[in-house]
Amino acid sequence: MNAKPEFETVVGKDLYYAVHKGIRLANARMLIALGQTDASDDSSVIRTLGALAAHLELSLQHLTHENDRIHSVVEARVPGGSDHQGEDHDHHLKAFADLRRMAEDVAAAGVDRAVKLRRLYQRFALFMADDLTHMHEEETELMPLITAHFSPEEIDGIEHSIVANIPPAKMAGFGKFMLGAASRSERIAMVTGMRQAMPQEAFDGLFAAIIGAPWTFGDWETMERALC
Ligand SMILES: [Fe+2]
């Protein structure tokens, strides 16, 4: 007899699967970058603080998509269904504010820059730990609730409304992490789907922004060298 799994994993359309894998990758890389930054090297500090600002911007965008496009429709059908995740999002907003303030402290620091950088690294690690737990709960509690109360067509509609509201300039940021975090077969399926759905010019422009240079469809090795 099979033991009951410890948590539920949605089979079928999962709004969180690909984007959360991307965010886990991005969080892990950001933590490593903060840890490897040499406080005595100005250019290293500037590069890492720039990466952190972009990372927090992307994280805020993701949280806003979830609030506007997922929580609002869940609440309309299952009142209170996304309460817990909504509270987590409020904690995330507090973490973003802390991290921005601590990054400013590092930028303005003098001889105490190493100490301030270490504090920023530690605060980011705590945020990441919270975010890992939060994303797991979204995938194993909120997504099963959505699957139970919405048809596959409605779930597709939620996903389309999220994607349609990401401005092209932000799409490259999500694309980098989502494609970088995917398995090769998932990556090929995602890129092939986008190629079929997008005008050639828009596809070429988006992938040049994602890879950092013009990219030819099917050149998976070049994509993986750039993103993985
Ligand atoms: Fe979330």
Image (tube, helix red, strand yellow):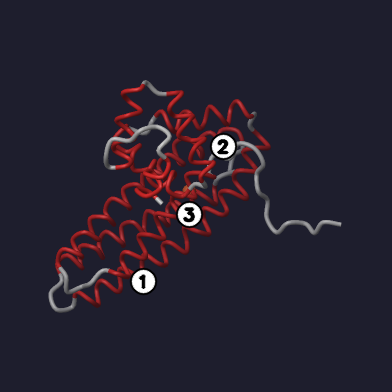
Is residue 126 found left or right of 81 in the rendered image?
left
Position of 53 relative to 152 (above/below):
below
Considering every residue shown, the one lying at the far top of the view is 199
State which tag comes first along the sequence, 2 or 3.
Answer: 2
Is residue 134 found left or right of 200 in the rendered image?
right
Q: Position of residue 175 (x, y in %)?
A: 39, 41
The residue labelled by disc 3 is 88
Crowd around label 2: few <14 · some 14–19 · many ≥20 (10 Å): many
User: Which residue does the image show at 16% across and 70% down from the upper left?
Assistant: 41
Considering every residue shown, the one lying at the far right of the view is 1
Disc 1 marks a residue whose amino acid type is Gln
The residue labelled by disc 1 is 122
Q: Are marks 1 and 2 in contact (CB under 8 Å)?
A: no
Crowd around label 1: few <14 · some 14–19 · many ≥20 (10 Å): some
> Mark 3 vs ligand 1: CB under 8 Å?
yes
Location of residue 150 by image quarter? top right
Depth order, front residue of 88/7: 7
Disc 2 marks a residue whose amino acid type is Val
Depth order, front residue of 15/222: 222
Q: Position of residue 225 (x, y in %)?
A: 37, 50
The residue labelled by disc 2 is 74
User: Which residue does the image show at 18% across and 78% down from the upper left?
Assistant: 112
Label 3 sits on a secondary structure element that is helix
State which tag comes first along the sequence, 3 or 1.
Answer: 3
Crowd around label 3: few <14 · some 14–19 · many ≥20 (10 Å): some
